[in-house]
Image (tube, rainbow, N blue to C red):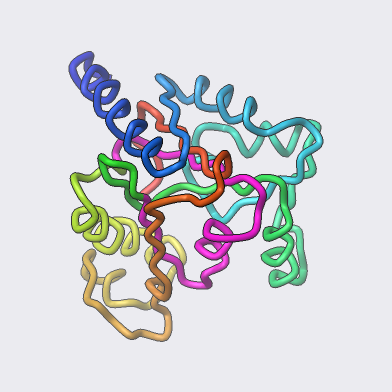
Amino acid sequence: MNENIVKRNELLAQKVINGLKSRNMTGYYAASKEEAVKLALELIPEGSSVTMGGAMSAHEIGLVDVLKDGNYNFIDRDKFEDKRAAMLAAYDADVFLASANAMTEDGVIVNIDGNSNRVSAIAQGPKKVVFIVGMNKICDDVDGAMKRARNVAAPINAQRFGLSTPCSKTGSCMNCKSPDTICCQILITRFSRHEGRIHVILVNDNLGF
């Protein structure tokens, strides 16, 4: 990665981390995917029950494989015949892994969800939430974060899941009410009442969608 981009990411990450601190959340900066995994494992004690809500960023840095192979109770919803049971198990997990569809420079986190299991677990349930967020997700403000979530993340995810939504065909949000829409619930996390619950690892890389 270009050294000027790296320097910009370092400086911007500190701004985001300060914003998170003001919102009773904790931020970290990882210069590489490997460093991000190391930071995440420091937040996830061995023996913890861990689950996730389809966070591609956690897969991309290799964290999911480490947890599956390590001394952790990884709740893999792909192995559940009853998907609802897997989703409900997330609410009582020690750690919930997540990513963000977008974040603001002052630490607000934006996520859009179809089944809403991901956003509901972020909002309430698991004892700890660990976000893995590439620096490509950082936006100026909430309006910018919403636009990114709806016009970048949502169309790509709709295409990834083979959904028949207008955005999967046009590449941008059409504010649809399609039966396949994945924009059912929008969660804006602007503050955490519970100190030590929400942790955000910012990664010096382009991760997720």
Q: Looking at the image, is 31 positioned above or below residue 96?
A: above
Q: Looking at the image, is 162 positioned above or below residue 55?
A: below
The answer to whether residue 23 is left or right of residue 155 is right
Q: Looking at the image, is 13 positioned above or below residue 48?
A: above
Residue 132 in the image: state x and y as whole percent: 48, 39
Please report the residue visible at 36 percent of the width from the left and 26 percent of the height from the top.
Answer: 204
Point out the stretch of residues depicted in magenta. Answer: 109-136
- Specify whether residue 112 is painted magenta: yes
In the image, 82 versus 161, the foreground residue is 82
Please report the residue visible at 33 percent of the width from the left and 77 percent of the height from the top.
Answer: 165
Residue 130 in the image: state x and y as whole percent: 55, 41
Please report the residue visible at 41 percent of the width from the left and 49 percent of the height from the top.
Answer: 100
The quadrant where residue 68 appears: top right
The answer to whether residue 65 is left or right of residue 10 is right
**In the image, farthest residue toward the top:** 3
The answer to whether residue 6 is left or right of residue 42 is left
Residue 59 in the image: state x and y as whole percent: 54, 40
- Specify whether residue 175 is painted magenta: no
Residue 71 in the image: state x and y as whole percent: 81, 32
Please report the residue visible at 41 percent of the width from the left and 76 percent of the height from the top.
Answer: 184
